[in-house]
């Protein structure tokens, strides 16, 4: 299957899941909460807790900067021009900020953060880079992105729809910018 077709399929799947998640957000949140409570103290939960701590310590307030810096360095090492990717990050960040400011959806667990929940800035930024990668790097980036955003839902930082809509925005912006610059890699 052609790379362009794969990326359109990913975009469509995210869109369908996003629409479905709005319907079941509260039920999904409660199910995750019960699952988390039943796994309290388990090895799996400890790995997920470590991931969240890693994200908060190393990526927390500088998450976007770290992500942009890592992606830019990767692009330069691959001898690719990073401007379209950086532009995608900027457009995505502006869209997410405007939506958060306009919609002001509270987080599932209110005491976790004062920031608004919808859409997820973390997922939008992670998925913005995805259209710029192919092959194994695409798969690796997708797995890492899905894992990090899953952890945010698992611990009640976001509803599933926050994550999916953020991923959709990020992926769509990256896809459109890549098409605009006629990048084929």
Image: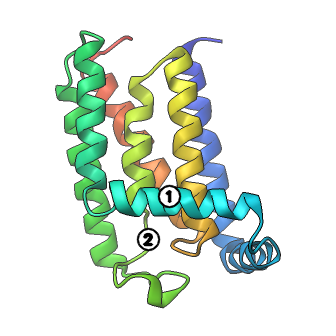
Where does the image place residue 93, in percent across and percent down from the top left?
Answer: 26, 54
Q: Who is closer to the viewer here, 37 or 6?
A: 37
Task: Identify which residue is drawn at 50% across, 33% down.
Answer: 141
Task: Identify which residue is drawn at 30% across, 12% down.
Answer: 78
Quadrant location of residue 99? bottom left
- Quarter of the picture holding the C terminus: top left
Q: Who is closer to the viewer here, 42 or 118?
A: 42
User: Of the numbered discs in the image, which one, if any, rests on residue 118?
Assistant: 2
Q: Residue furthest bottom?
A: 111
Give the mark, 1 or 2, whose residue is nearer the N terminus.
2
Where does the image place residue 10, in percent across and percent down from the top left?
Answer: 59, 35
Q: Is residue 102 left or right of residue 35?
A: left
Count of picture labels:
2
Q: In the displayed structure, would residue 5 be above or below residue 47?
A: above
Q: State how far apart marks 1 and 2 are (Cα).
A: 8 Å
Q: Residue furthest right?
A: 38
Q: Is residue 164 visible?
A: no
Task: Identify which residue is drawn at 66% across, 62% down.
Answer: 46
Q: Residues within 10 Å of mark 2 (few under 14, many from 20)?
A: many
User: Of the numbered discs in the image, which one, if any, rests on residue 165?
Assistant: 1
Q: In the displayed structure, would residue 140 be above or below residue 109?
A: above
Q: Are marks 1 and 2 in contact (CB under 8 Å)?
A: yes
Where does the image place residue 89, in percent across and percent down from the top left?
Answer: 26, 43
Badge 1 element? helix
Q: In the displayed structure, would residue 47 be above or below residue 141?
A: below
Quadrant location of residue 177? top left
Q: Is residue 150 left or right of residue 67?
A: right
Task: Identify which residue is drawn at 29% across, 34% down.
Answer: 70
């Amino acid at each position: 299957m052609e790379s362009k077709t794969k990326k359109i399929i990913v975009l469509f799947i995210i869109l369908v899941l996003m629409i479905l998640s709005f319907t079941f957000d509260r039920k999904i949140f409660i199910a995750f909460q019960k699952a988390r409570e039943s796994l309290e103290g388990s090895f799996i939960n400890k790995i997920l807790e470590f991931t969240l701590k890693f994200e908060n310590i190393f990526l927390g307030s500088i998450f976007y900067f770290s992500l942009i810096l890592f992606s830019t360095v990767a692009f330069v090492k691959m001898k690719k021009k990073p401007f379209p990717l950086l532009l995608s990050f900027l457009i995505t960040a502006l869209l997410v900020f405007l939506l958060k400011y306009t919609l002001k959806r509270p987080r599932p667990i209110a005491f976790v953060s004062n920031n608004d929940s919808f859409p997820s800035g973390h997922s939008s930024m992670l998925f913005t880079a995805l259209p710029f990668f192919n092959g194994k790097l695409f798969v690796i980036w997708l797995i890492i992105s899905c894992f990090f955003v899953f952890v945010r839902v698992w611990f009640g930082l976001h509803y599933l729809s926050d994550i999916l809509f953020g991923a959709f925005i990020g992926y769509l912006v990256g896809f459109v910018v890549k098409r605009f610059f006629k990048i084929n890699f």
